[in-house]
Image (cartoon, rainbow, N blue to C red):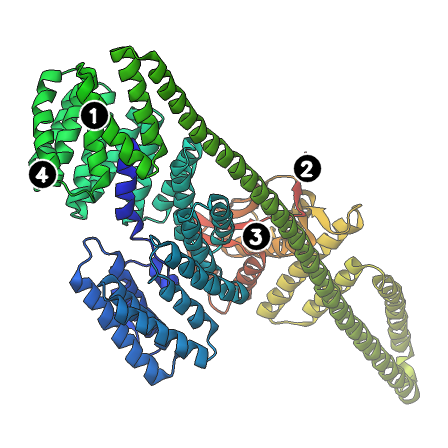
Amino acid sequence: MKQFYFFLLLLFFISSASAQSSELDELTLPVLRQKLSESKNDTNRVKLQLALGHLMFFKPNKGAKDIDSAKNFAAQASTLSYRLKYDFGIINSMLLSAEAFYNSDDRKMGLKIAQNALAFSQNHHNNDGQARSYHMIARYYRVSDPLEIQNRMLYINKAISIFRKERNILWLSFLLTVNADSLFQVEKNTEGLKLLFEALNLGKGVSRRTVEGIYRNIGRISFKLGDYTNSLKYNLLALETAKEVNDTTSQRGAINHVIASTYIEMRQYHKAIPYSVEVLTMARRYGEHRFVILESAALALEYTRTNQPGKAFAVLNEMKNMAVNDLDRLSVAVEYINNLIYAKRFGEAALYVQQLTSLLPKISPANTQELMGAYNALASYYSATGYVKQAYRYTELYATMAHKQNFAASARTAEYRYYELLFLKKGNKKSAIEHFLKEKEIKDSIDNVAKAYQIFLLNIENEALEKNKHIDSLSRNALLIETKIKRNQLLQKVTIGGTALLLVITALIYSRYRLKQRSNALLLQQKYEIDQKNAVLQKLVADKNKLLEDKDELLSEKDLLLKEVNHRVKNNLQIVMSLLESQSTQVHNKWAQEVIIESQHRVQSIAFIHDQLYNSDKVSEINVLPYITQLLRSLDGSLNKKRDKVKITLDADELWLDVAQAIPVGIILNELVTNALKYAYPDNRSGAINVSLKQNGQRAILQVSDDGAGSSVDLGFDMADSLGISLVKGLNAQLKGILLFTYKTGVTVKIDFPIEKTATVRD
């Protein structure tokens, strides 16, 4: 009879289950009201009105006022939808109105509105509206009627077919769950379970709240069929999901109640207590008086079975004070009798037996569960106190109702009590053995059903696992293909960029060659004119010719080097540096010279990269430790020429980076160290610049700090028109890094960037 509480409370909790009309249904009531107040008269406002109306049905202590609010939201959404010619809003406002009439027990009007929504959807070729209308119509067919439940499943299947075709996963997973409930109702448990697992696989990708309900349904049917292990497993999963989505609805109460009931059936009463306490708290919060009475009975049972009689009878006393009608008083008497019998306090139990006996004629025969509980309690009392005749009488009443209601567990209880009474009390061994065998037969039947269910559930779980493995394999293959495509795209971009750079360099070389030709022609013409006009200047002309010959020799040597440049990118960059150096000697503006020198260092930082590539066996990555060492040594030699030299230190891991990352790192380092040498130590001050490159998991941290002036204003480093800082910020963005400036004792610049997959740290 412990399942008695489960089935009664389930009627309360299951009634709250419903579908989400949209993703907005997962938002809380205050959030939706805030969004509605800020919305404009557009389709989004319609969706908010529908979501708010739908949420009215989930409020604790839902009453007529809440249903009227839902009707008002439906009317507002309908008016705005017709003005916007928004079919989705028109259809769903009708369905919201139909649901409101359904909840107010005006089934005739509600069904008519749902049928109008279906007709509108069909006329406007709106598949989503048709499917939702089919679902609403299906709700008007009762699950308790064998004929009506078939019509209910017919309409649900029509909706499922449409949502499957439209790939509306959210609604499809929900309706599969609804159809599974109907199949369980007609004892088609295996078919229903298949639908639940299909819904579970679909729901995992769209809504955790949907997954919560599916876990709960699997746990519920597992409990019903006596598979308590899987009942506990799936209800705990449902509870975990409920906590994850912050579910405070009655569905969470249903989950806690089934967990408590499962622990009771497994005789683990101490584990059931916290779950019953939470259910009781929720029932009180919702103001559900009858369910407070029933859950109090379960909690008292748990306290008694864990040798906490004080707490048990405190709960029963509170339950007694809450009784307001004969049905409540009957429940109180039954629970006092059961708990007092367990405590072997038969004298006190006798008082409640008298009270219960006087209450029985007042209870309607329609209250089957309550009457069975009373008969069972009386049979237990009379059996325990040795009144065999009375015990046998109430056992017969209990057994008759158990067989009529097809309650196998209750029938088994009755058969075992027959056996005890006949064998132990009367000594009628033959009849006792018949009842004993009947009890074992029922037990075997229950166990066989549970085992068959366990095997079927295990097979479905394995099938789902194999499907998920196959899906994971396909996902991994798709990810590998995507990675290859991205890599190929990167190589293509690098190739195009390299080709463009080579074309620019070639154009520069050709320009220099043409300039040299023009210069030589001009010099020859001047030499000829000077020879003709003044023979006295022959010695001067000879000296000049000597200089021209030396220049031609140098140009010849340079031409040889330029030919070599065509084969190595490093030499190409060296030529760019040579051009910058030549240009700096011809410019007398100090600022321009500094700009050219800075550009030279930037190019040099790239040249060192290609030098490392040239001397390395790898073509796509370099060891940044020798590269940084070489770069810092170059900067130290070219810029650190003050009287009191600045000390540059390096602390770096032997980190290998892809070229696409090494080049930005080199340029950034060049900019930061150059800036520190130029601005951090005015007036020949001494100091230290610390460079660090460390790996932190899958990320690298580049840090350059100095102990110099320490002011971003004095250093000019954060100026908006600074090319250096623009380069650093732009290259940091290319690295997808986090850039941080700290001005404390000197300046510290820190860049934290992810390491590409090709990068590694070598021992």
Whole-angstrom CA distance, mark 2 to mark 1, is: 86 Å
Pinpoint residue 50: horizontal percent, then vertical percent.
31, 69
Of residue 549 and residue 318, the one placed in the foreground of this image is 318
What residue is shown at x 92% (from left), y 88% (from top)?
532
Which numbered mark, 3 or 1, is in the foreground of this view?
1
- The numbered mark, 3 or 4, whose residue comes first in the sequence reads 4
480 left or right of 6 in image: right
Whole-angstrom CA distance, mark 3 to mark 4, is: 81 Å
- The numbered mark, 3 or 1, whose residue comes first in the sequence reads 1
Of residue 332 and residue 391, the one placed in the foreground of this image is 391
What kind of residue is marked 4? Met
SS at badge 3: helix
What kind of residue is marked 2? Arg
**Location of mark 3 (residue):** 673
Tag 3: Cα neighbours inside 10 Å, few (<14), some, or many (≥20)?
A: many
**Location of mark 2 (residue):** 762
Looking at the rendered image, the quarter that the C terminus falls into is top right
**Location of mark 1 (residue):** 393
- The numbered mark, 3 or 2, whose residue comes first in the sequence reads 3
SS at badge 4: helix
Which numbered mark, 3 or 2, is in the foreground of this view?
2
Q: Image quadrant of residue 494?
A: bottom right
Which numbered mark, 2 or 1, is in the foreground of this view?
1
Which numbered mark, 3 or 4, is in the foreground of this view?
4
Task: Specify whether residue 564 is in view.
Answer: yes
Dot label at residue 221: none
Q: Image quadrant of residue 584?
A: bottom right
Pinpoint residue 45: horizontal percent, then vertical percent.
32, 73
Pinpoint residue 317: horizontal percent, then vertical percent.
9, 30
What kind of residue is marked 3? Val
| Disc 3 and disc 2 in contact, CB within 8 angstroms | no
